[in-house]
Structure formats: C-alpha cells, structure tokens
Amino acid sequence: GTLFTRNSGKALPPSCFFLRNSSARSGKQRFGRLVLGIETSCDDTGAAVVDEAGCVLGEALHCQKEVHLQAGGIIPVVAQQLHRENIEQVVQEALCASGVSVAELAAVATTVKPGLALSLGVGLQYSLSLVNRHQKPFIPIHHMEAHALTIRLTHHLEFPFLVLLISGGHCLLAVAQGVSDFLLLGQSIDIAPGDMLDKVARRLSLRKHPECLSMAGGKAIEHLAQTGNQELLTFRLPMQQYRNCDFSFSGLQNLVNNAIVQKEKEEGIQEGEILSCVKDVAAAVQHAVTVHIIQRTYRAMLFCIKNGILPSKTATLVVSGGVASNQYIRKGLQNLADANDFALLCPPPRLCTDNGVMIAWNGIERLRAGLGVLHSTAGIRYEPR
C-alpha cells in the first residue's frame, strides 16, 4: 500500500522535472485510441499519453542524473528508491497534462525488459496495480524495440529499416522488419559506448575541469574534443579481424587508460589532476569510438544490401540512444550514410534518451497490430537481461 503514496515530504528539484505539452485542456484534438506509457528501466522515471496519430497529449519525466553524477555511477537501490518516490507524481502529471483520465485509456504500456531489475520492478508493480484497479489491457514493452520504433512517431517511415542504438547501456545493430519483428545483426560483446566515454571522463577527472563542472561524462568529452587535436594519440581499433557486426569497447578503454597513465608520467602529475593535453585525449578517444561505430555499421549496411534485406532505393539508417546526440559521431554516421545512398534519420534529442513517449508509442504500435496486448496480468514478470 505505502509504495505508491505521493512523496509529499521531499519536494522534487524543479530542474529535474520536465513537463511538456502541458496545456492539453485547451481542447486538444485526439485521434483514435489512447495509451499511457511508463518507463523505469534505468534512472529516468517517464510517463506519457499518446494517441494513434502519434500526437503526444501529455508527458512528464523525472531524471535522476544529478544524484547519480555525484555518486559517480548508478546505484540500483538508489535508483529504485527515486523511482518509488516519483512514479505516482510523474504519471499523474502526464495524465493531467493530457487532460485524459485512466478510464479513457485503451491500454497501459510499460517497459518490462531489459534494464535494472530493481528499477523495472517499480514501474511494473505500479502499472499492474493501475490496470487491475481500472480493468485495462496491459502491454509489456521491450525497451530496445521502443527505442527502435520511436522514429515512426516523428517520421512516416515504413518497414524495413536499419537501426543503430548507441547509449550508456546499449549498443546494437538490428533490422526493424515489423512491430515485433527484429533481426539482430550485432551488439556490444562487453560495455556500451556511452559507458566507456563516461568511464574515460571519470579517469580524466573532467568534473574538475572548469569547462565541464556539471556535465555528464560523455558530454564533457564531446565538449573538450571540439578544441582538441585527435591526431596526438591513435588507438588500435577493436574487432578489425572479426567478420561480423559486433562492437567492443572495453579493450579500447584499456588502451585509453594506459595512454592516460603514460601522459601523467610524462607531465609528472598524479591521477586526479588534469592533464594539459586533456582536450587532445578527449578528441582522440571520441574519434576512435566514432570510427569503430562507423566500421561496424558499414558492415551491417553492406550485409543488408547484399542480401536484399533492405530495399536499395530507399534504404534508411535510424540512429537513436543517448550517444546519438553526440554531434561528432552523428556527423560521421551522416557521411557514412551519404556515401552509401542511405537516408539517415534520428529522433529529436529528447526522444533519444529514455522517456515515456517511446513506450506509449510502442504501445500504440502493438495495439494497432494486435500484438502482445494482455487482458490478464497473471504471471507477468520483468526481465533485467
């Protein structure tokens, strides 16, 4: 019972609450059925109401970035507690902003995999309580599929298309062939690119750098790299000899760490102090990550065209995930797409990171296709992996 009581004691920091499209009460047009989407797979609590036309009627998002930034990483039990404290308010704000009551919803869609077990549990428990109370259908959502299909909310894109998802927790290449039909071409065999960039930023102590005080790790690397010389250091790229589309970033990270130790020795400084060549290191690291991503994506493109998996006339590469907002990486992918006659599409940055909108939209897609809409909540589990 007490899990979902409103957290009135602790006020939410305003900086962390984004409420968008809030003036829904002014007679917003709705089209077809409505789905409430709920996202708690990692460290963002998100909710949104979307209609069949892909119109976002209302949404709310609570991000935990500040808390985890101070801890130097996501601590699952802390993330769980923050989801618990905020989920009721986030869902209510999304409903309120959309001017929609739970009774008017066609279904509730919630991320059930993959993600942090403790975080997923909060969203699922809340959602099941909601659908059972109001007798609504429930649509379990695969987080990565939701990312992959977000582009169909913002662009009229037909299946099939190639998807590259690059974020702090994920890295994969797949062909979206239908609403629940995905052909996995490759994925990271160790860590994700965003995770690697964050770790390198931490090793470089970028939070102490005057230009990067409040920036997340990947953002700090991108910022410093703009004025760095990427040719100062070169790193051997991973997976060169593997004839597949998989990625690997942990070996690259070790090479980078060794290079940092070497530079610290040369400059006579301790770990924790800022290297004078920090911008050059940032530029070299960002370049290596970009080239690796481009090489693997190029292999996927060739494979798809050669095997007739994608139509060569209208082949499209969709890039999403938090790392997709890195402008250097995006420019590299744009050049790759242009050189191979692929169109490149990216959702807007706010839909590239975790949010409730993509979950609600995936719910709409599944509702329309009649796929995975459950009328009984018995036996539904979350699956962290």
Image (cartoon, rainbow, N blue to C red):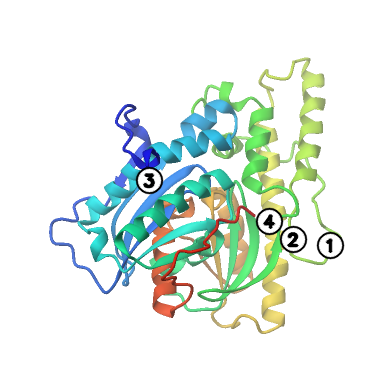
- Give the mark toward the camera: 3 or 4: 3
**Residue bearing mark 3:** 61
Q: Earlier in the sequence, mark 3 or mark 4?
A: 3
Q: Earlier in the sequence, mark 2 or mark 4?
A: 2
Q: Left or right of 142: which side holds 241?
A: right
- Residue 168 pos. (x, y %): 60, 46
User: Could you tell me how far apart the alpha carbons at marks 3 and 4 are, in whole angstroms?
Assistant: 29 Å
Which label number is shown at residue 301? none
In the rendered structure, which amino acid carries the disc numbered 4?
Answer: Ile
Q: Determine whether the residue tagged by mark 4 lies in a helix, strand or loop.
A: helix
Which of disc 1 and disc 4 is earlier in sequence? 1
From the image, tell me which residue sits under label 2. Answer: 246
> Which residue is label 4 attached to?
293
Point 67% across, 35% down: residue: 199
Q: Considering only order in the chain, which callout, 1 or 3, is on the residue closer to the N terminus?
A: 3
**Mark 1 and 2 residues: CB-CB less than 8 Å, in contact?**
yes
Q: Which residue is mark 1?
A: 242
Please, what secondary structure does the residue beneath circle 1 have?
A: loop
From the viewer's side, name the closer residue of 177 and 202: 177
